[in-house]
């Protein structure tokens, strides 16, 4: 997957006026902070050049993860969505992803850091899309401030894992109150990221939320304590991305865990979600599935032509 063309161009323009050595240093600093200082409510990204580096190194992957999560969600959820809140918007990946899939009329981005706000806003102003151009950006601290805005869709991607557990729970309550129709939370596809998603899932079901994706219609998550549920999306890497990350491979696989939960009545279909990358051998494909009856491991053989064809094309995180 790739960023929308006009976003790629906007990032390249900003990058042209920035020192590559500085961007590389920033990229290393950001990675270090996210590995070692996240989960404690620290400010991890404050400088203008760090925001630019984030937009080159991380935004293509967070965009791809959000886009995939939203695509899976809106394949199952058909409500009319006109307004959205992008919570902890960073440089705006969530808004760009939602705007690519939905007929939005109004986008509001809430973010704490000026550097992210200024860059994210400048990318949207450069767009030809009126909704992106007109997006409102509000400097907000999700922990210390109340949220007065409400929207049909609330997206919070790669944000809650930066907070400590008590602030995360307080914030989720605010996000639920701000949601008119559906809340989508996306976190890194790691054991820690999934643990957070599982906790939020239980909490939101407890206060009346209805799961739309990725889970089938079951209240108790059947994934074992030592396991984790995630989806994967393949993201193209630009030349500058490879340079900043010292990599040769033309793509990277972004792993993410997510939950989409709605407020109104939702008739869940009897879906089976692929939990792991399918294991393909000659003549057979092994699939690990999350179903209404719990986890199932099935083998599809070549003899079963129709299902074999479908299984071959199915990826981790998709419906089988
Ligand atoms: C990893 S970035 C994710 C940005 C964007 N959502 C994305 O998916 O690319 C996390 C963002 O959350 C913001 N953030 C973290 N804690 C926050 C808080 N308490 N209030 C507002 N924004 C916050 C950070 O400033 C940062 O821009």
Image (tube, rainbow, N blue to C red):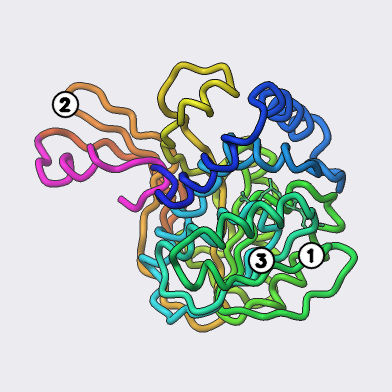
Start-end of magenta stretch: 303-320
Please give the label number shown on residue 109.
3
In the rendering, which numbered label is found on residue 226?
A: none
Pinpoint residue 37: horizontal percent, then vertical percent: 83, 35
Residue drawn at (55%, 21%), measured in percent from left and top? 243
Residue under circle 2?
Answer: 283
Disc 3 is placed on an element classified as strand
Question: What residue sits 54% from the left and 42% below the top?
Answer: 13
Q: Secondary structure at mark 1?
A: strand
Tag 1 residue: 139
Locate the N terminus and report the quarter of the image it occupies: top left
Residue at image x 16%, y 26%? 283
Query: Relative to 270, is 218 on the left or the right?
Result: right
Q: Secondary structure at mark 2?
A: loop
Mark 1 closeness class: few <14, some 14–19, many ≥20 residues within 10 Å: some
Q: CA distance from mark 3 to mark 1?
A: 9 Å
Point out the tag, 1 or 2, that comes first from the N-terminus: 1
Q: Is mark 2 within 8 Å of ligand 1?
A: no
Please state which of residues 166 and 13 is positioned toward the viewer in this rendering: 13
Q: Say left or right for 218 vs 168.
A: left
* View extreme (front): residue: 17
Question: Eyeballing the image, is 187 above or below 279?
Answer: below
CA–CA distance between discs 2 and 3? 49 Å
Q: In the rendered view, would you say 310 is above or below 125?
A: above
């Amino acid at each position: 997957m790739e960023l929308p063309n006009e976003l790629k161009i906007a990032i390249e323009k900003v990058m042209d006026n920035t020192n590559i050595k500085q961007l590389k240093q920033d990229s290393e600093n950001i990675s270090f902070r996210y590995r070692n200082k996240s989960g404690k409510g620290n400010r991890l990204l404050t400088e203008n050049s760090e925001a630019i580096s984030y937009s080159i190194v991380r935004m293509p992957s967070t965009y791809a993860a959000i886009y995939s999560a939203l695509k899976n969600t809106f394949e199952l959820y058909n409500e009319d969505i006109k307004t959205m809140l992008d919570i902890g918007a960073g440089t705006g990946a969530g808004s760009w992803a939602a705007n690519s899939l939905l007929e939005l009329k109004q986008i509001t981005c809430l973010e704490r850091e000026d550097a992210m706000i200024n860059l994210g806003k400048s990318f949207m102003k450069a767009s030809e899309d009126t909704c992106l151009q007109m997006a409102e950006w509000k400097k907000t601290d999700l922990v210390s401030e109340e949220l007065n805005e409400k929207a049909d869709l609330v997206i919070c991607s790669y944000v809650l894992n930066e907070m400590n557990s008590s602030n995360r729970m307080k914030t989720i309550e605010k996000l639920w109150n701000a949601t008119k129709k559906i809340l989508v939370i996306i976190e890194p596809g790691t054991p820690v990221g999934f643990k957070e998603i599982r906790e939020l899932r239980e909490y939101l079901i407890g206060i009346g939320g209805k799961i739309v994706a990725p889970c089938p219609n079951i209240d108790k998550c059947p994934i074992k304590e030592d396991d984790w549920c995630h989806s994967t999306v393949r993201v193209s890497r630009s030349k500058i991305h490879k340079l900043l990350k010292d990599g040769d491979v033309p793509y990277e696989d972004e792993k993410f865990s997510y939950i989409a939960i709605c407020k109104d009545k939702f008739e869940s279909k009897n879906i089976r979600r692929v939990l792991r990358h399918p294991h393909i051998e000659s003549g057979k494909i092994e699939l690990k599935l999350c179903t209404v009856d719990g986890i199932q491991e099935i083998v599809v053989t070549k003899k079963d032509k129709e299902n074999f064809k479908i299984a071959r094309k199915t990826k981790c995180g998709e419906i089988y």
